[in-house]
Image (cartoon, rainbow, N blue to C red):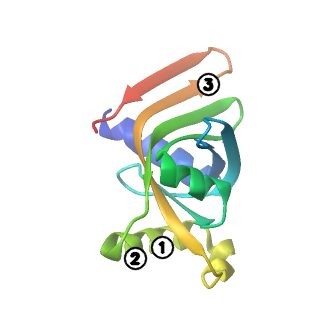
Amino acid sequence: MDEKKKAAFIAYIGEVNCGVISTADKQHGPEAAFINLAVASNLEIVFETLISSRKYRNLQTDPRAALVIGGHGKTTLQIEGFVDEPVETDLDEAISLYYDACPQNNGHRNWPGLTYLRLRPRWIRYSDYGHPWKVEEYFLKA
């Protein structure tokens, strides 16, 4: 993916800054949740969750996730990748990035059991269902 396309995706995600993340439980059953999110310059997605949430428990077993971001008319951005919990310097950067993008959630900072997760994209699909219809797919390096 070229830098111009990457910048366009970052702008798209940053403008919407929310989406639906899907994970799978131990029996491979689906779970989806609406989340606020932030995007880094390398297209990594940062979001918060409680360690008591289904998504958190699911990601401890299977770190794969799918994310759908939409909101620009008939367009969507689908992202699949692996989720981890950033630590140390990465965690500080993730928290800063998240609250810069989602200042309305600043009051969550002291919630018991709150943690921050990072989705590292491996596949991205941009779809425009307007006229003309267009779909673009990108596989990112592991």
- For residue 114, above or below residue 5: below
**Structural distance between the alpha carbons of marks 1 and 3:** 32 Å
64 and 4: which is toward the camera = 64
Tell us which disc is closer to us: 1 or 3: 1
Where does label 2 land, which residue? 92
Query: Dot 3: few (<14), some (14–19), or many (≥20) neighbours within 10 Å?
Result: some
Residue 53, percent across and down?
Answer: 66, 61
Look at label 2 and name its amino acid.
Answer: Asp
The C terminus, quarter of image: top left
**Structural distance between the alpha carbons of marks 2 and 3:** 35 Å
Look at label 1 and name its amino acid.
Answer: Ile
- For residue 76, above or below residue 83: above
Residue 77, percent across and down?
Answer: 56, 35
Q: Residue at 66% across / 78% down in the picture?
A: 108
Where does label 3 land, which residue? 128
Q: Residue at 48% across / 37% down in the picture?
A: 80
Where does label 1 land, which residue? 95
Q: Earlier in the sequence, mark 1 or mark 3?
A: 1
